Each structure stands twice: as C-alpha cells, then as structure tokens.
Image (tube, coloured by chain):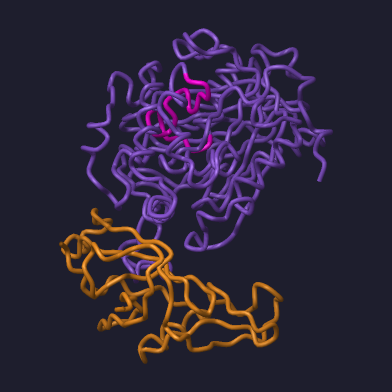
Chain colours: A purple, B orange
C-alpha cells in the first residue's frame, strides 16, 4: 500500500490541556469538555466547526461517575457533529479514521479527546475480574493486571537478552530528568537517581513501581484538519508526514520478545517511515507510548534503533535525556508527566514542533537542536497493537 | 527462599468454546484445540480453526511437556484474597504441541525458575475448578 499521496495533507492544529495529576471531584465528561474546549480555542476555530469527535478510548465508570461515551460528551459540548466515535479498548484506529474523514471531505475538523479520573477514583487497571468474578480464564491463574503481561515480556528480555532493571532505570531517570523541565509534569520537582529507582518496591517482579506509569486525572485533546485549512488557523500546523498501524489480534501471552520484524511496532513503523520517506537518522526526537519502561525499550528495538541484546549499550540516560543525541519523551512521558495514553506523546510532539515546549524546548535547551521531524508511537494491548506517526514542522 | 505451592485462585469464566478444556482439567487431562481439516493446534479455543477457518475442529490430549517461555513473580495482591498467596508465579509455557498457555509454576523454589527450563504439567485441584500448573522436570 503506497500512502505517499497522503503525505503532509493532514495537520494537527490545536492542543487542549486541563488541570492534571490529582484533581478530585471531577467527572470524566468534564475533562473531555475542558480539553476539547481548550483545543478548539488553541486552534482558533469554534465548536460548531467540529464535525467529528473521537474519544480516545472507553473506561468503565468509577463509583461516582456515569458512563461516558462520545454521545454524552457531544451533549456536554453542545455540538451536533456528523461523526461520533470512541475506541472501546486498547486497539486504536482513530488516526486512520481521522485521516480518512478529512481526506474524503466527510469531516472538516476532527477532535480526538482523552479523559480519565482514575487517580482520584482509584480505579485499578485490572480487567480479569469484575466484582470479584472472572471475566475470562486468566484469573484462574491469578494473572491479574496489565503490568503482569508486560513484566512477562520484560523477564524474557532480561534473562535471555541482557535487559533488566539496569536498562529500565536509565529510561526511568532520563524521563524524570525531562519532567524536571516541565512544570505541569506529575514528577516536576522530584529528581530521581539510581538509588531512588532501586528503592521502589517490586510490583510484579521484575517490574518495580517506577517501571509503571502512575494514573492521572485530567484530559488532553487535539484538533486535526487538512493542511490547506490549517494555513489560515492560529497555530503553526504540524503535518502528518507518515502514518502506519498494525494490529496483532492475538493473546498477550502469544507475543514474543523475539517477534522482531513481525512485531506490530516494526510493521507499523515501516509503513509510516515509507510513507514519510524517512529513515531512522532523519528523526530528531521520539515521543513514545511508555506505559512501562520496557515498552520504550521494545519500541526503539522494534523500530530498528538497536538489535535484540543491545539495549544495555544503547539505552542510556545520557542519550535519551535532556541534551542527549536521541531525545525521548521530552515532557517526562507517561512515566513522569501524565498518563493520557497516546495523547501524552502526541501532544508533546506537536508542542515541540510548534516551539511551545517552554524550558524543555528542543533547539533552545542547551545541547539540543530544533526538531524538524518527531516520531510518535501509540501502543495497545501488550505490544499487540501499534501505531506510528511521523510528524513534521514543514511540508 | 520461597517455596512455590499449588494454589487455587478464581474460577474461570467458561464459554461454550472453553468448556471442554476445563472439563478435561477436572479429569487431569490437558486438552488443546486441534483442526481436523488442516491438522494444526491453536490457542485460544474456538469453534473455527483460526488458520483455515474450518469448523471441523476438536481436541487432543497434550503430552503435558513443555518449555517455560517466561514468568513473573506477583509481589502485589491485585485482589484482597490474594494477599496470603504472595509471592506466586504466573508463567507462559510453550507446549510440545505448539501452543503457549498461561499457567503457574509450582512445587519448586522460586529461585529455581528460569526462562527456557523444561517443565511438565501437574494439577491444582480446587472445589470449584481444577487448573493446570507446571513443575520443573528434574534432571
């Protein structure tokens, strides 16, 4: 499939933030409304211009919230779009939907919004039980939580291919160092060193608490439109130069560290890089989906930055952190900024390419260069679903 | 040192497609789905073969021999009833028959567990269900 006709035809033109971290007393819907309102203001459009609204994904409501869907959010926004949609689980196609709607003209402005109140409502990311009853066969083995599935991959990489806490601490500290430059980051003002990483308790061995992203209250939204329309809007457009996606719809347990070129990340990134006409050396920075430290390792490996067995040499806090040659997750990422799933890396890439990233701005911060191309990843399930986005500041 | 004992967790949610597997467990038979049309084993269970989409599918009894692909050690209880069971090991095992199962490793010391180790099936019998666990093969 040759997607090069789509290159740089769609742009991201606005980003919406909300208060984040621990923000008690808020419904999910209210965060969607706030993030969307701020994104459309940022873009310089009015809410009536939004003719497609996607909610990034569905979460079961907390004890003090109603079910939140695309329909309830359109009502709360007072809009009547042509298209309302919502990803149900971790496999996400909204990027393809958005590009398709905009290219065909079925929609002129698409908003993607994420919101959650899991921190204050203390909703656990455990899908295998519902009210103490099993939802599938995994609870029969005590196999609860997403962290266990990722830790399973991490263990294999650790015992056979030289990965492990020595590598993951580097990722953790590098991203923390970025967060120290980002006043809205959850870990702003909280420096982390090796001793601090190792002091974190084990959750599901080999993962410590600091290998996993903390939950966050809040929301994040972006506005997309055609490159043509983007020219007359308020912000400098950020162009989608390449997209790629792949869904390995298999059980998490069937994913292998050794999947290599058959991994969803490898397949998705190859499509995106081909459409964009780039190779790895054209990439100025990456904003990667980092639900766990090991996810960053696996993504960079499957993208081809290093081979299986080479993570210890490649992944250093010096290389990935502020002033390093390969900046990764410059907001602090989900691990140290905030857990808005794929919207955390996407929004940070846009802000960096627009030159709006404050003290952490690449090209302004000492030892960094102004970014022209930033690669963004979105990862779902347990390495089962992956999307790669190549974003560019120039057409 | 922590000894890994057989333990029972939560009764699985059983569907028409997984019922035969769980019934087999009660009789200490490890059944894997197999396509009679193309001959391939597959997982998870399903009425249709995911390879050739034939519905001429059934079950075959596995040897119970396999290799540990990977494992994790639960140090945190994700449900209050699990606190007393910590630490326990959840593992994935590649069966000789070519499918990978989620399971537990038991009847050994925690420190013995290694990726790639040969294992064989055993059974954790509970009042409501029996599930397969795997134990190291002694040299």
Q: Is residue B114 above or below residue A300?
A: below
Quadrant of the drawing holding the C terminus of chain A: top right
Name the chief secondary structure element in magenta: loop
Name, please, the residue furthest toward the front: B139
* Residue A341 located within the stretch drawn in magenta: yes
Q: How many marks?
A: 0
How far across and down, in percent of the image, does residue A301 sit? 54, 42
Q: Residue A138 or B32: which is nearer the viewer? A: B32
Q: Is residue B127 left or right of residue A392?
A: left
To which quarter of the image does residue A97 belong? top right
Q: Residue at x 28, y 56 (%)?
A: B78
To which quarter of the image does residue A107 belong? top right
Q: Is residue B115 visible?
A: yes
Q: Is residue A129 visible?
A: no
How far across and down, in percent of the image, does residue A47 sit? 63, 24
Q: Is residue B59 above or below residue A283?
A: below
Q: Residue at x 55, y 29 (%)?
A: A286
* Magenta residues, start to end: A324-342
Q: Residue B97 or A313: which is nearer the viewer? A: A313
Q: Residue A86 or A295: which is nearer the viewer? A: A295
Q: Residue at x 39, y 23 (%)?
A: A19
Q: Is residue A118 left or right of residue A269?
A: left
Q: Is residue A186 above or below residue A66?
A: above
């Amino acid at each position: 499939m040759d997607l090069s006709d789509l290159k740089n035809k769609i742009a991201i033109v606005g980003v919406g933030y909300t208060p984040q971290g621990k923000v008690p007393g808020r419904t999910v819907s209210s965060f969607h409304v706030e993030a969307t309102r701020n994104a459309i203001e940022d873009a310089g459009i009015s809410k009536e211009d939004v003719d497609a609204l996607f909610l990034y994904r569905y979460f079961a409501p907390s004890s003090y919230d109603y079910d939140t869907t695309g329909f309830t959010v359109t009502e709360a926004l007072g809009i009547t779009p042509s298209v309302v949609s919502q990803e149900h689980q971790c496999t996400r196609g909204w990027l393809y939907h958005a590009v398709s709607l905009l290219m065909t003209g079925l929609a002129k402005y698409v908003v993607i919004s994420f919101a959650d109140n899991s921190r204050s409502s203390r909703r656990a990311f455990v899908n295998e039980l519902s009210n103490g009853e099993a939802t599938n066969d995994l609870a029969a083995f005590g196999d609860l939580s997403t962290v266990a599935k990722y830790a399973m991959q991490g263990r294999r990489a650790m015992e056979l291919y030289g990965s492990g806490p020595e590598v993951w601490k580097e990722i953790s500290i590098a991203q923390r160092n970025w967060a120290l430059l980002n006043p809205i980051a959850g870990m702003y003002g909280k420096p982390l060193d090796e001793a601090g990483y190792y002091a974190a308790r084990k959750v599901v061995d080999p993962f410590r608490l600091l290998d996993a992203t903390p939950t966050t209250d809040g929301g994040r939204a972006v506005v997309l439109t055609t490159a043509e329309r983007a020219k007359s809007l308020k912000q400098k457009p950020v162009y989608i130069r390449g997209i790629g996606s792949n869904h390995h719809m298999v059980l998490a347990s069937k994913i292998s560290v050794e999947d290599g070129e058959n991994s969803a990340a490898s397949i998705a990134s190859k499509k995106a890089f081909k459409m964009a006409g780039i190779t790895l050396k054209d990439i100025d920075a990456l904003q990667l989906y980092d639900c766990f430290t090991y996810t960053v390792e696996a993504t960079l490996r499957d993208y081809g930055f290093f081979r299986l067995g080479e993570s210890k040499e490649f992944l250093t806090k010096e290389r990935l952190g502020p002033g390093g040659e390969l900046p990764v997750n410059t907001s602090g990422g989900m691990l140290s900024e905030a857990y808005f799933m794929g919207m955390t890396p996407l929004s940070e890439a846009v802000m960096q390419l627009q030159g709006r990233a404050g003290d952490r701005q690449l090209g302004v911060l000492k030892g960094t260069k102004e970014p022209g191309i930033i690669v963004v990843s979105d990862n779902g399930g347990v390495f089962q679903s992956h999307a790669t986005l190549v974003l560019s500041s120039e057409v | 040192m922590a000894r890994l004992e057989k333990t029972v967790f939560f009764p699985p949610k059983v569907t028409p497609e997984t019922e035969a597997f769980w019934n087999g467990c009660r009789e200490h038979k490890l059944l894997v789905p197999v396509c009679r049309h193309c001959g391939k084993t597959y997982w998870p269970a399903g009425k249709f073969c995911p390879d050739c989409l034939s519905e001429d599918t059934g079950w075959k009894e596995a040897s119970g021999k396999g290799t540990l692909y990977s494992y994790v050690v639960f140090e945190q209880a994700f449900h209050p009833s699990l606190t007393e069971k910590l630490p326990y090991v959840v593992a994935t095992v590649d069966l000789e028959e070519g499918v990978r199962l989620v399971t537990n490793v038991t009847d050994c010391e925690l420190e013995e567990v290694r990726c790639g180790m040969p294992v064989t099936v055993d059974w954790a019998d509970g009042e409501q269900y029996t599930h397969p666990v795997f134990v190291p093969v002694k040299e």
